[in-house]
Image: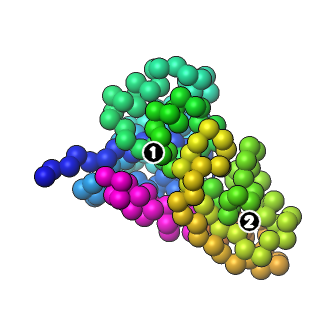
């Protein structure tokens, strides 16, 4: 029986190195397609990456997330099945979580529940890990609920830290894990749910 492709929308606020990995990973997939890239920043690097790969982009303003049906319409007209947050810094509002229950992935650059929550993103996370004197860090892929970084954990990968590692060293180690696993975990999870 022919099963239609599952459509993903990637949401990202920054450079988009994870988004790029995901786009490349699914480029020739017969089951999953990256259909849309959404950013809240009109000059985000991720938009250039999407355009380079011929993927439609959408810039949204903070207020678009406030509960307007228009944004849901943007997603439904493109038959979006899953949302993938890749360095997306706005809180996902409740109406979007209920429209996509267990269908919004997030990646966090630490081993949740440690070093998560509001304001904990990017370098702030790695600085907190360093300040805590942690001997390991890693990344967490989890479902998104209405709270920052609290949804069910799907996957974690760890890396060992040396005492002399700077926050930049930690960031590099963690990003390597993110690039290695995010697309694979998305694929496995979606395939198992189909
Ligand atoms: C990634 O390390 C991701 O885990 C982090 O932002 C970075 C985005 O990098 N996300 C958060 O901190 C969310 N709390 P990228 O734009 O190169 O993919």
Q: Is residue 153 above or below residue 56?
A: below
Give the extent of the magenta segment.
Answer: 176-194
Q: Based on the displayed image, in which of its 4 quarters is residue 27 positioned?
A: bottom left
Q: Residue at x 51, y 42 (%)?
A: 11
Q: Residue 5: x, y in percent?
A: 26, 48
Left or right placement of residue 32 versus residue 92 in this view: left
**Element type at marker 2?**
helix
- Nearest to the observer: residue 136 or residue 23: 136
Is 134 colored magenta in this rendering? Answer: no
Tell me the number on the disc at residue 84: none
Q: How is the image coloured?
A: rainbow
Q: Is residue 82 above or below residue 160?
A: above
**Element type at marker 1?**
loop
Q: Which tag is nearer the camera, tag 1 or tag 2? A: 1
Q: Confirm whether residue 187 shows in the render.
A: no
Left or right placement of residue 28 versus residue 50 in this view: left
Q: Which residue is mark 2?
A: 168
Tell me the number on the disc at residue 103: 1
Q: Residues within 10 Å of mark 2 (few under 14, many from 20)?
A: few
């Amino acid at each position: 029986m022919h099963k239609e492709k599952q459509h993903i929308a990637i949401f990202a606020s920054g450079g988009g190195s994870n988004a790029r990995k995901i786009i490349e990973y699914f480029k020739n997939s017969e089951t999953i397609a990256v259909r849309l890239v959404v950013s809240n920043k009109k000059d985000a690097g991720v938009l250039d990456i999407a355009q380079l790969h011929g993927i439609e982009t959408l810039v949204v303003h903070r207020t678009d997330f406030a509960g307007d049906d228009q944004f849901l319409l943007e997603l439904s007209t493109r038959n979006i099945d899953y949302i993938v947050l890749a360095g997306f810094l706005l809180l996902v509002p409740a109406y979007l979580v209920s429209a996509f229950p267990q269908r919004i992935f997030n990646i966090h650059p630490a081993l949740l529940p440690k070093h998560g929550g509001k304001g904990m993103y990017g370098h702030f996370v790695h600085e907190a890990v360093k300040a805590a004197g942690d001997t390991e860090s890693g990344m967490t892929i989890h479902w998104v609920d209405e709270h920052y970084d609290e949804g069910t954990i799907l996957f974690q990968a760890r890396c060992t830290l040396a005492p002399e590692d700077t926050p930049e060293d930690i960031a590099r180690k963690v990003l390597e894990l993110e690039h290695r696993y995010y697309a694979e975990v998305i694929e496995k999870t979606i395939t198992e749910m189909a």
